[in-house]
Amino acid sequence: GQNIDQPTEMTATEGAIVQINCTYQTSGFNGLFWYQQHAGEAPTFLSYNVLDGLEEKGRFSSFLSRSKGYSYLLLKELQMKDSASYLCAVSLYGGSQGNLIFGKGTKLSVKP
Amino acid sequence: GAGVSQSPRYKVAKRGQDVALRCDPISGHVSLFWYQQALGQGPEFLTYFQNEAQLDKSGLPSDRFFAERPEGSVSTLKIQRTQQEDSAVYLCASSTAHQPQHFGDGTRLSIL
């Protein structure tokens, strides 16, 4: 079976940095995605890693270690609007064309 | 520009009724995916189309679930003889080559 684990909930303070971890055990691997989902809204794409290392995009960075089956999403200079669920997802095949296997999501609450 | 559009946004049906959920993908997107998202969970894959061809339907939970995309654009997910466990948000996503999936806001289905 496929298994993707991430913490259920996290709390952080406005202006701080938070790291959301994700570990995966899947039958295949063609990339790892992070999506942000506000309550009642569509998941929106944040980042994609297919090779080991760090990908930086503004306040958001994502890291991947394929040998460890591990990724994290780093959010800097937290803002209140960053309060949302963060979904880790693995593409088993076909890169962005393949269906995604999602974790259960990490609900992040940013407090003043 | 237009994103992925799903209708209706909310659907309430009595147990045993049939429902049809519609997805309008982003124009020109070849790939279309359906996911089911239960409350507090990550999306779970249901089925995948490439143009009009349904290439993977391994995630459909039973033969009561049927999806089609006859002209390679709009897709419909049909659920026959609905049951309470079908209550969930149904998400549609579309993508083109080497691009991440773009999600619609989903249809929230409640079975009474």
Image (cartoon, rainbow, N blue to C red):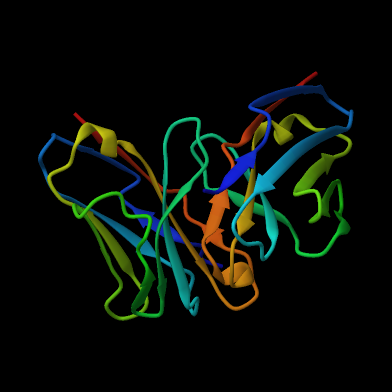
Q: Position of residue B32 (x, y in %)?
A: 44, 68
Quadrant in which residue B76 is drawn: bottom left
Q: Is residue B105 left or right of residue A43?
A: left
Taking the view exactly as shown, the residue that stands out farthest to the top is A112
Q: Residue at x 67, y 66 (%)?
A: A30
Residue A53 is situated, as x and y percent measured from the top left of the image, at: 89, 57
In the image, B21: left or right of B25? left
* Count of numbered badges drawn on the protein: 0
Q: Position of residue A40 (x, y in %)?
A: 49, 37
Instruction: Look at 13% across and 35% down and name the residue there.
Output: B15
Between B68 and B102, which is closer to the camera in this rendering?
Answer: B68
Can you say which quadrant of the picture contains the N terminus of chain B?
bottom right
Q: Is residue B13 above or below residue A44?
A: above
Quadrant placement of the C terminus of chain B: top left
| Closer to us: A70 or B35 | A70
Work out whether A57 lies above or below B12.
Answer: below
Q: Quadrant of residue A77?
A: top right
Q: Nearer the viewer, residue A58 or A93?
A: A93
Residue at x 61%, y 36% (from the top left corner): A105
Position of B80 compared to A29: left or right? left
Q: Position of residue B104 (x, y in %)?
A: 47, 55
